[in-house]
Image (tube, rainbow, N blue to C red):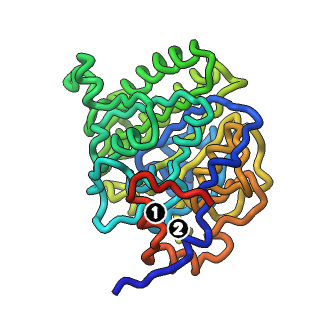
């Protein structure tokens, strides 16, 4: 018999009725494949492959203790934690969640933004049916989903614009600029959510001009240039009314160089994050946090005011309330994997939970 726990019941918050807004800044959310802080660390990589991403952290808001925990360590799990403030707990392994509705009983930050009048658009170079991402989008938003099949229907060829896992990131960011222009012309708040893929192991993909490391770091150098160029474009377009959030989806997976370099240090690995033009500044940035804490943090970045600064199991990093993992690291890691009746209800439609 599976061991159960009331930990999630005791801590889950998804009150959408009492949410208020101080302002409604536009959101550009970039979720970058396998981007962790090892690639910004000169002790591990010298030279580092992502100097521009490192600089963005240094001049903006950055939470250095963003660790990977249970149910957040692969692409759809990382996305789930960012969208719902909960880990992905499934009776299957990895990317096999293909139900037609994705956690229909759980509240998502996508629901919150749409209820507040945001237009949502999603763009990725891979087939979003993989791992159920397209179902997540369709279940919790009415936003337009531009993925590999969308671009192929539009007449774009993988032979011309493809990388190793679908359409390459440079193509995606160029297309995202067009989407940004169209969204900007509507004069209503929007959220543009971009998923990159070129740094997917084992070797990644890079344009020839970035190939100087002769390993997966070339793909990270490529990503570094693409994100930096796009951030600059967004800031030229509307620097006052737009917040940009850059998040790695999870720690880097096994590839041709990272693990041997990581053996140089014994510190806990952390996930890349950077918050540009947030609505407010954090009280402090050094507490331990997880990917679930990014859900309320994203909302408060754009001007949302959450009851107790909470959403899902996450605690906004703009508040002075300790995150669950910071409150009791051992308890968090022992209780989260256990069976939860409340979490089980998230799989059932029309049962959204407010507390």
- Quadrant of the snapshot with the N terminus: bottom left
Where is the C terminus found, in terms of image quarters? bottom right
- Say whether residue 26 is left or right of residue 143: right
Please say if 275 is above or below 355: above
**Is residue 70 left or right of 113 when viewed as pictured?**
left
Q: Residue at x 36, y 57 (%)?
A: 253
Estimate the x, y position of residue 325 in percent, counting from the top left. 61, 70
Is residue 339 depicted above or below 48 in this figure? below
Residue 67: x and y in percent read 55, 62
Q: Residue furthest front?
A: 350
Q: In the structure shown, which secondary structural element does the residue marked by tag 2 occupy?
A: loop
Q: Total label count?
A: 2
Kind of element beneath mark 1: helix
Q: Residue at x 67, y 30 (%)?
A: 25
Q: Which numbered tag is attached to residue 262? A: 1
Which residue has dot 2 on it? 265
Foreground residue, 44 or 305?
Answer: 305
Question: What whole-number distance in Å separates the C-alpha atoms at marks 2 and 1?
Answer: 6 Å
Residue 344 seen by the camera: yes
Residues marked 2 and 1 touching at CB (< 8 Å): yes
């Amino acid at each position: 018999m599976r061991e159960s726990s009331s930990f999630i019941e005791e801590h889950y918050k998804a009150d959408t009725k009492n949410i208020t807004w101080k302002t409604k800044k536009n959101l550009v959310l970039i979720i970058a494949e396998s981007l962790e802080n090892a690639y910004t660390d000169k002790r591990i990589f010298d030279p580092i492959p992502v100097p521009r991403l490192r600089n963005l952290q240094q001049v903006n808001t950055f939470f250095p203790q963003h660790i990977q925990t249970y149910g957040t360590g692969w692409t759809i799990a990382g996305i789930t934690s960012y969208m719902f403030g909960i880990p992905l707990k499934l009776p299957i392994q990895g990317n096999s969640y293909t139900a037609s509705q994705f956690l229909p009983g759980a509240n998502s930050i996508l629901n919150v933004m749409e209820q507040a009048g945001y237009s949502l658009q999603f763009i990725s170079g891979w087939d979003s049916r993989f791992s159920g991402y397209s179902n997540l989008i369709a279940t919790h938003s009415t936003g337009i989903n531009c993925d590999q099949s969308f671009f192929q229907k539009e007449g774009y060829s993988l032979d011309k614009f493809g990388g190793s896992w679908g359409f390459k990131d440079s193509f995606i960011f160029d297309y995202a600029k067009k989407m940004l222009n169209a969204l900007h012309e509507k004069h209503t708040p929007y959220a543009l959510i971009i998923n990159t893929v070129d740094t997917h192991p084992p070797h990644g993909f890079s344009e020839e001009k970035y190939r100087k490391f002769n390993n997966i770091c070339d793909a990270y150098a490529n990503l570094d240039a693409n994100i930096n160029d796009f951030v600059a474009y967004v800031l030229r377009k509307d620097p006052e009314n737009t917040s940009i959030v850059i998040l790695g989806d999870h720690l880097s997976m096994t590839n041709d160089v990272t693990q041997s370099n990581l053996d140089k240090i014994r510190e806990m690995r952390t996930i890349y994050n950077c918050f540009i033009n947030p609505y407010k500044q954090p009280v402090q940035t050094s507490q331990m946090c997880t990917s679930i804490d990014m859900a309320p943090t994203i909302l408060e970045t754009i001007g949302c005011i959450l009851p107790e600064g909470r959403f899902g199991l996450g605690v906004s990093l703009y508040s002075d309330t300790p995150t669950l993992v910071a409150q009791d690291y051992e308890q968090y890691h022992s209780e989260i994997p256990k069976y939860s009746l409340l979490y089980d209800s998230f799989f059932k439609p029309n049962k959204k939970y407010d507390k």
